[in-house]
């Protein structure tokens, strides 16, 4: 299961309502609702009581919340590399332009290679 979907589920479960959870995550309410529905579809169970006014979990939702928190914590530690000696950063650097082999320098006043002179 996607870690983003788990994060959306945990945020929705911990917030008093979907609107506040969506605001905290920086996504729209519809995106959050779609993510939760996708998690429910993958599991095959309803995790939220849709008839309640506020965000309430079903019994299965409460049980899955603990598992989702553990998966989320494991996923975040795996993304950070799990190595405290690592200074972070993605490595690499600025890409350098490859001019290719055998390219002749441009000489002022000479026609450019491969280009025809415009006729008048």
Image (spheres, rainbow, N blue to C red):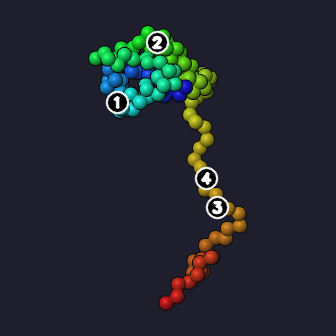
Quarter of the view holding residue 91: top right
Measured as percent of width and height from the top left, residue 81 is found at 60, 26
Rounded to the nearest whole Å, what is the CA distance between mark 3 and mark 1?
Answer: 48 Å
Residue at 58% x, 81% y: name it: 116
Cβ–Cβ under 8 Å for marks 3 and 4: no
Decide: few, some or many residues near mark 3? Use Cα within 10 Å; few <14, some 14-19, many ≥20.
few
Where does the N terminus fall, quadrant-wise? Answer: top right
Q: Which mark is residue 29?
A: 1
Decide: few, some or many residues near mark 1? Use Cα within 10 Å; few <14, some 14-19, many ≥20.
some
From this view, report whether residue 11 is shown above or below residue 27: above
Q: Which residue lies furthest to the bottom in this view?
A: 120
| Residue placed under numbered mark 4 in the picture | 96
Q: What element carries label 1?
A: helix
| Residue placed under numbered mark 2 in the picture | 60
Rounded to the nearest whole Å, what is the CA distance between mark 2 and mark 4?
Answer: 53 Å
Rounded to the nearest whole Å, what is the CA distance between mark 3 and mark 2?
Answer: 60 Å
Quarter of the view holding residue 100: bottom right
Rounded to the nearest whole Å, what is the CA distance between mark 1 and mark 2?
Answer: 23 Å
| Residue placed under numbered mark 3 in the picture | 99
* First-in-chain label (4 vs 1): 1
* First-in-chain label (1 vs 2): 1
């Amino acid at each position: 299961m996607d870690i983003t979907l788990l994060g959306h589920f945990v945020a929705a479960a911990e917030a008093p309502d979907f609107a506040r959870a969506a605001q905290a995550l920086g996504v729209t309410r519809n995106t959050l609702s779609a993510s939760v529905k996708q998690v429910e579809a993958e599991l095959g169970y309803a995790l939220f009581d849709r008839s309640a006014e506020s965000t309430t979990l079903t019994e299965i939702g409460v049980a899955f919340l603990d598992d989702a928190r553990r998966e989320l914590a494991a996923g975040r530690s795996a993304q950070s590399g799990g190595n405290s000696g690592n200074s972070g950063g993605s490595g690499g650097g600025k890409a350098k332009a490859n001019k290719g082999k055998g390219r002749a320098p441009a000489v002022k006043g000479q026609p450019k290679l491969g280009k025809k002179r415009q006729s008048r």
